[in-house]
Image (cartoon, rainbow, N blue to C red):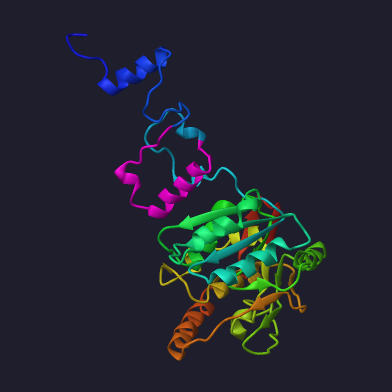
Amino acid sequence: MGGKFELPWHRAFDQFIKETKFESLRGGDNQSFFIHVPNSRKANPNELFSVMNRVENGDINPQQYNHVDLVGPGVEWIQRKRDEPFIFIICSRNVDLGKFKDCWNSVVKQTRRDWGTIIIDGGSDNGLQDYIEMLIRNYRDKVTFVKEREPQGIMYSTWNAIMQYCSNPNSIIITLDADDALLRNDVLEVVKREYDLGADVTVGSMLRVDKEKEYLVDFTNPRENRGGNVWQHLRTFKKYLFDRIREEDLKIDGKWENTATDWLFMLPIVEMATNPKHIKKKLYYYNPGPEKESRRKIREDIISKIIEKSSYKTETFNDTKSNNRRVW
């Protein structure tokens, strides 16, 4: 055409292969494909590697078909969002492999089977990610595993899991630290009984291995009583309560926090709840480990800033997804 080739040589070769009985030695299998990642998409490695994980599992965003360059933001690649009645959120980073195994075993031994799990690992470099892959091999339908390449901190990971990977506003969210474990095989049965009686939040109770202590709970004015112990394990709540929390209220000084994160989200959740319940039966194995005095002072400073945040008691919410309109 005008003395010029219409196609570059490799495209002409591809066309020739397509129209004949021959096969290309470039990959061999005509089911093979690739997705080109433009440089502009490489600025966020966690999003990029999240997409890569989806591709490796054969979970392709339909928008990608017939496109060479990567199409769509990372959230659009989450094809299978969790919507089970109970969803465990487990965040980890460099947790001892044995402790994570105990944590995972306590989940899979639950007598109820109507649960799903989202595990988010914050870029562990101790082999934990590969170990998790091995543990969940036979539970692929019940587990969403997000592997961060750059750790974002436990509060961001928790927010990301609940907001991006869960679709059912009425799912009961259960936060479980990766180095702790459930104490009983009927934990979900115990929790379900409370929700059947109208609960929308539950807290407690836990077995601490470092000391024996009972935590009295104040659901009425937690901010006026140093948080009212609403942070304590086991923590469960309806997803729609977490959805209402303003993103800035999950941060300290404008940054995602990695200290006292349970205080950050449990205080507003309890303030919005209509029927929070304290479970006194010990359901949770909690091993906090030693804490240096310098670290304790930092933690207390963060807790003070959390308590000083605005209360959610007087907020008004219109929930189209959960069919609830509540005024406090």
Highlighted magenta segment, given as a residue range: 33-61
Query: Residue 44, relative to residue 156: is it above or below?
Result: above
Camera-side residue of 328 and 137: 137
The residue that appears at 32% across and 19% down in the rendered structure is 13
Picture quadrant of residue 215:
bottom right
Q: In the depicted view, which residue is nearer to us: 268 or 189? A: 189
Asked if residue 41 lies left or right of residue 92, the reply is left
Side (left or right) of 62 relative to 47: right
Residue 328, image x and y in percent?
67, 68
Q: Is residue 274 above or below residue 68?
A: below
The image shows a total of numbered marks equal to 0
User: Does the magenta segment cover residue 79?
Assistant: no
Q: Compared to 267, does 61 lie above or below? A: above
Which residue does the image show at 64% across and 55% down from the upper left? 318
For the point 59% across and 72% down, the residue is 99
**Image spot of residue 78 (x, y percent):** 53, 45
